[in-house]
Image (cartoon, coloured by chain):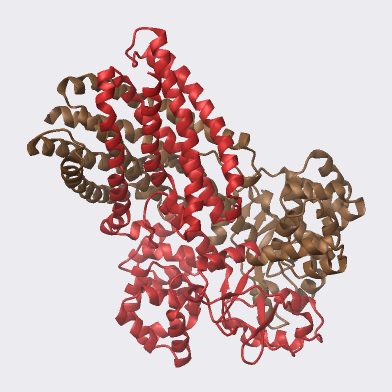
Chain colours: A red, B brown
Amino acid sequence: MEDFNEIVEELERLIEEHNYYGIKNLLKDIEPADLSLILQEFPKKIGTLFRLLPKDLAAECFVEMDSDYQETLLSSFTDNELKAVMDEIYIDDTVDIIEEMPANVVKRILNNSDSETRKTINEILKYPDDSAGSIMTTEYVSLDEDITVEDALKRIRRTGVDKETIYTCYVTKPDRTLLGYITAKKLLLSDDGMIISEIMETNVIFVHTHEDKEIVAKEMSKYDLLALPVVDNEDRLVGIVTVDDAIDVIEEEATEDIEKMAAIIPSDKPYLATSPFEIWRKRVPWLILLMLSATLTSLVITSFEGKLVSMGSTVLIAFIPMIMGSGGNAGGQTSVTIIRGLALEEIKMGDIFRILFKELRVSLLCGATLALATFVKMITIDWLILNNIKVETFPEAALISFVVSLTLLVTIIASKLVGCILPVLAKRIGFDPAVMASPFITTIVDVLSLLIYFGIAFAIM
Amino acid sequence: MEDFNEIVEELERLIEEHNYYGIKNLLKDIEPADLSLILQEFPKKIGTLFRLLPKDLAAECFVEMDSDYQETLLSSFTDNELKAVMDEIYIDDTVDIIEEMPANVVKRILNNSDSETRKTINEILKYPDDSAGSIMTTEYVSLDEDITVEDALKRIRRTGVDKETIYTCYVTKPDRTLLGYITAKKLLLSDDGMIISEIMETNVIFVHTHEDKEIVAKEMSKYDLLALPVVDNEDRLVGIVTVDDAIDVIEEEATEDIEKMAAIIPSDKPYLATSPFEIWRKRVPWLILLMLSATLTSLVITSFEGKLVSMGSTVLIAFIPMIMGSGGNAGGQTSVTIIRGLALEEIKMGDIFRILFKELRVSLLCGATLALATFVKMITIDWLILNNIKVETFPEAALISFVVSLTLLVTIIASKLVGCILPVLAKRIGFDPAVMASPFITTIVDVLSLLIYFGIAFAIM
């Protein structure tokens, strides 16, 4: 971070001095990912600065920028400049950029591409969002099965410069049917005269163009792949997904799950680039739904309130938030653990009874600990010290504390079982388990815990 | 998944028939990651099955297994078998296995390694958990700066078979000081006679052995690296981290953050492999802490309760859970968004005022929407339909609904600001922001919302 600020200050100084040579020198060795952030600090000068970059760095830096800045730059480009940048970048990045641009900019990009590229772009654009097809690149190395290692290496040397990766090469029939793959490592370590079909791996892991990109990332992570081939319905190779894109997907999916768990509708825009109105749209639906469902808790309280007042037991009301909160926290812990386990495939649907039994034991342990702690706390802190429980004798205080503690025990067991069942149930009926996290569980547990509380209170007191 | 079950059934049948040839044939083409799961379904036969695998597949499969099964297998191995497996696997995997094994097994592994390997293992074991040193491998390709491309390729062909990756080669001085790197792609695409020092990249991104592995993964993700060099305090290259390990770190870190957000102390064991007692230990501390801090809500309620009863306003009590719940949900949404933004470095410390201003506007929008929705809902559903608000006239019902709605507005604004400030504050004082998620926010918001509620109620009614 200090580096970053130093470079920005240095750049500011050079811009003021109109020292273009100095700027060129300063920027030429910065990593594209950092450079894009630095240039974005100078929105008014971004076009000038961009034109001072070497061609390949300019293109790599352009890919890393936020779409707003990309749009500004694209609008300022001449057709030749636009063509120069677009020729340098990989086709999957071009598609990503196009997806964020307004129609007139898209039209300009397509008009300045050759007909082959234009065709490919249009094909990739047709794949559904979040599919393997939408994140793949069509720039991979393909080899014929009957050539030698020497010929293969020659082919890589001839065509490799434009390929996103040369480290996994795909062996295909002339009609592009996928036969196998061979790594650059294997090629380099094999004798020149060997035939590809004899040394290639035929046990290929691949996905179809319509496969969810989350599955793509999971397969790549599970099998430690640097690239995963994507085939069409006729099993013809149409592209590959590279590991850097898989990492982006893994991070996005974790963010989405976290957002869903916090009762937010996921968005794929970074927070700072999202308007308050958009954020409101992602957050308010769940808030309203959960608010409405809290009508049940109001109903339960209202229907028992009169009885509590007439029994002189209004002291019990003071512990409602603590019981509800503990139940929500306990249920949230379980549901989040199960949701993440399902997402990482550490937990499978068939494990439901093992999980239930485990959570039952955990909830007994947690419930008993909390019940005991609450009992001691209520007698000492609430009754003796704070005089928060307004009764005179120890038996009275002990009775109230006992009711609260017993409620807590039962509530925690119930909450953890609810937190365990709901995500699995959601998955079974085809919903995303992540929605069944704390806020949702809390709403159910709130009602449950009140019913348990009043049930126990009226039974005992 | 169906494949998985089919293979397991087929294997069961073959085992019953003692058809070892069939078993060999069935298992030899399965991916190691899947094979480990399949073998773990046969805990009693795992040793026999394992011995039917080809040597390299056996080793790769062993690396993928859960540590319990690894231990079982290691105990059943003869010294020769143990040596055969350990010779096949990469040194970073060996270290991972050793870290999970009891002392006697570790001793056997070390006794069966050659002295060079033993020295390397012991050095890696010295690095702190979660450091770059602890996840690196020492098996990388290093090149001298003054050799030609042809010599470099020859060297890779000679030594590459034991290296975890040959795709990024590191150029070092004879004392192992890191000078630069060159990719296998660049080597293949360059002329044979060129000198490495002329074509290598000197702008190397590297980390020190003690760097947090989370930073390692972030750098690799940010710069799209397949491998990241690790240097010691004298800037000498000691190892590299490969992208497959970085992906594991990214997934682990997301899981840890999610666990912390749900008030669970993170564990690095899979859920199903953790005993109920261990799970209890990870969950109960936060439950107790949050339960204790709820003493404050009890205090607030107790001190206002008498007044409510004497005013005949006990109807207000029924809406406490809804207000608290909405405040907790609203605050949780904000805190989780900020926490994730900080983790992904989309939000920086310097952005605090921008975030606050944005959250203020979002909370006004959310608060106003919810207040309005609540008012309408209380008049229609609670008063007219359910008779949940026990008053006779519309002005009385409207007054109560107004108090609740206004409270909701103020509570949501307060909750979102708390949810925004606490994670940033935590980060500033060096705490993990993830701890400041929903459960923690909820406890603070509970007290806040009660004070706001009673404050507004007594001011207006």
Horizontal side of A293 relative to A408 (left or right) equals: left
- Residue at the front extreme of this rendering: A459
Quarter holding residue A308: top left
Residue nearest the viewer, comparing B394 with B411: B394
Rendered position, B183 above or below A103: above
Image quarter for residue A206? Answer: bottom right
Across and down, in percent, residue A287 comes to 30, 48
Q: Which of the two residues, B96 or A415, is positioned nearer the viewer here?
A: A415
**Which quarter of the image is occupied by the C terminus of chain A?**
top left
Residue A241's place in the image compared with B308, above or below, is: below
Tell me if residue B390 can be seen: yes
Q: Residue furthest top?
A: A393
Viewer-proximal residue among B450 and A273: B450
**Vertical placement of A408 versus A439: above or below?**
above
- Total of numbered circles in the picture? 0
Q: Is residue B125 left or right of residue B369?
A: right
Horizontal placement of B299 versus B271: left or right? Answer: left
Residue B54, image x, y percentages: 84, 66
Quadrant of residue B447 in the image?
top left
Question: x, y (%) of residue B339?
Answer: 43, 47
Q: Position of residue A70 (x, y in %)?
A: 37, 72
Is B456 drawn above or below residue B233 in the view shown?
above
The residue positioned 57% from the left and 60% from the top of the image is B220
Instruction: Say whether residue B216 is visible.
Output: no
